[in-house]
Amino acid sequence: MWELVMESTLDTNSSYKYILMSEYFSETCVVAKQDEKIVGFITAFTPPKASDTVFIWQVGVDASQRGKGIASRMLHFLLNSKSSKAIEYVEATITPTNKASQSLFQKLARDFNTTCESSEFFTEDLFPGDEHEEELKFRVGPIKR
């Protein structure tokens, strides 16, 4: 996962973050492989005060696989897993210029015939330096299966 991130425009986290997420949040993380190579992943967790919500930290897809629906299929796989039966909402933070991620969560809402709302969440002044945009919170739900 870390190698895929290093080759992308995603925010860089330490390799330790991906190991930690895989170990402690394995029920809410997804990996897509092709010929034993990781071509996509989702890191996510259930917030301690919102057991009906899964927060998507990152969605990564290898450049060679973009546009093939892998991200959408991984989200559906996560939401249809046994461990996600209590999940009614999907949340993520997305920058205003990341139209691809915004489209992904809007599509998820359409797929589940529900709403996708966005609101101000983490403003630019919270991030060190001048290089990070604000992060909007996207909330999809309620998810009915």
Image (cartoon, helix red, strand yellow):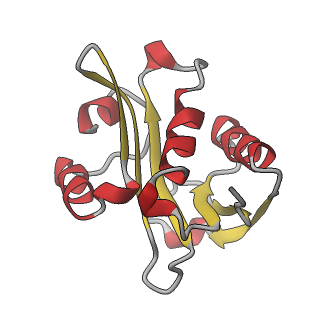
Q: Name the image quarter holding residue 122.
A: bottom right
Residue in the foreground of this view, choosing between 81 and 124: 81
Question: Is 37 on the left-hand or right-hand side of 121?
Answer: left
Residue in the foreground of this view, choosing between 113 and 92: 113
Q: Position of residue 100 (x, y in %)?
A: 66, 35
Residue in the foreground of this view, choosing between 143 and 100: 143
Q: Name the image quarter holding residue 98.
A: top right
From what the image shows, is residue 132 above or below residue 70?
A: below
Question: Is 77 on the left-hand or right-hand side of 43?
Answer: right
From what the image shows, is residue 35 above or below residue 134?
A: above
Quarter of the picture containing the N terminus is top left
Quarter of the picture containing the C terminus is bottom right
Figure label count = 0
Visible in this render: residue 72? yes
The residue under the point 57% across, 75% down is 52
Q: Position of residue 31 (x, y in %)?
A: 35, 37
Q: Position of residue 76 (x, y in %)?
A: 57, 43
Most extreme residue toward the bottom is 49
Visible in this render: residue 9? no
The residue under the point 45% across, 71% down is 46
Q: Position of residue 81 (x, y in %)?
A: 46, 52
Question: Is 99 on the left-hand or right-hand side of 117?
Answer: left
From what the image shows, is residue 74 above or below residue 109?
A: above
Q: Name the image quarter holding residue 90.
A: bottom right
The residue under the point 34% across, 46% down is 12
